[in-house]
């Protein structure tokens, strides 16, 4: 294994990048490039998980932009925050079965997760797995003109008209 056999004959060492998986190699894709699933030292490269987020209101209408949420990988090993397009990504994820969960904020309920159970299989190599979370908004967001006096309102007369004692900004006139 050191280039010289026990009787001092030259032995051929495994050649990473020759396309033949040999002793000591996890993979051999025939090149010495990183980022293609098999590294330049013939080890598997870690994958990733794409997180897709959809949110709906109480009537089932999609909410855009998507509120930001926090996702945890394997009980906090990694944390990512979704953007307003409802996307997030875990990188450098160990291949195999991984657990993705979401920290729900007040006013939201989990509707569904695909794949079910929040367990996502990440293949070895540079492939990405995907998990889809769908949430339902469980409380109506405070809104000026809805007839409900909310914490940030001086008044709320149930309309969005000026000149009736309560402005369109729900402030006394």
Image (spheres, grey):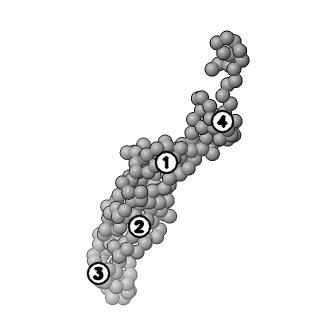
Which numbered disc flags the more N-terminal residue, 2 or 1?
Answer: 2
Q: Which residue is mark 3?
A: 147
Which numbered disc flags the more N-terminal residue, 3 or 1?
Answer: 1
**Residue at point 66%, 15% (across, down):** 5
Which numbered disc flags the more N-terminal residue, 1 or 4?
Answer: 4
**Residue at point 41%, 67% (across, down):** 55
Q: Which residue is mark 1?
A: 122
Dividing the image into 4 quarters, which one contains the C terminus? bottom left
Q: Nearer the viewer, mark 3 or mark 2?
A: 2
Crowding at label 2, few (<14), some or many (≥20) Cα neighbours within 10 Å?
many
Q: Gap in Å between the C-alphas at discs 4 and 2?
A: 48 Å
Task: Locate residue 49, reporting x and y percent.
Answer: 49, 51
Report helix, strand or loop for mark 4.
Answer: loop
Between residue 63 and residue 92, name the one nearer to us.
92
Report helix, strand or loop for mark 3.
Answer: loop
Q: Which residue is mark 4?
A: 20
């Amino acid at each position: 294994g050191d280039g010289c056999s026990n009787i001092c004959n030259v032995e051929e060492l495994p050649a990473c990048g020759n396309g033949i998986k040999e002793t000591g190699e996890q993979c051999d894709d025939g090149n010495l490039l990183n980022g293609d699933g098999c590294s330049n030292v013939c080890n598997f490269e870690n994958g990733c998980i794409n997180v897709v987020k959809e949110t709906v209101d109480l009537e089932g209408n999609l909410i855009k932009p998507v509120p930001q949420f926090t996702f945890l990988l394997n009980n906090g090993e990694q944390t990512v925050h979704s953007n307003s397009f409802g996307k997030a990504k875990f990188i450098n994820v160990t291949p195999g079965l991984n657990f993705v969960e979401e920290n729900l904020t007040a006013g939201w309920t989990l509707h569904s997760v695909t794949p079910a159970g929040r367990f996502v299989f990440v293949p070895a190599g540079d492939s990405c797995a995907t998990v889809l979370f769908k949430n339902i908004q469980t409380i109506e967001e405070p809104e000026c003109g809805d007839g409900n006096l909310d914490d940030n309102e001086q008044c709320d007369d149930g309309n969005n008209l000026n000149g009736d004692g309560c402005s369109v900004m729900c402030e006394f006139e």
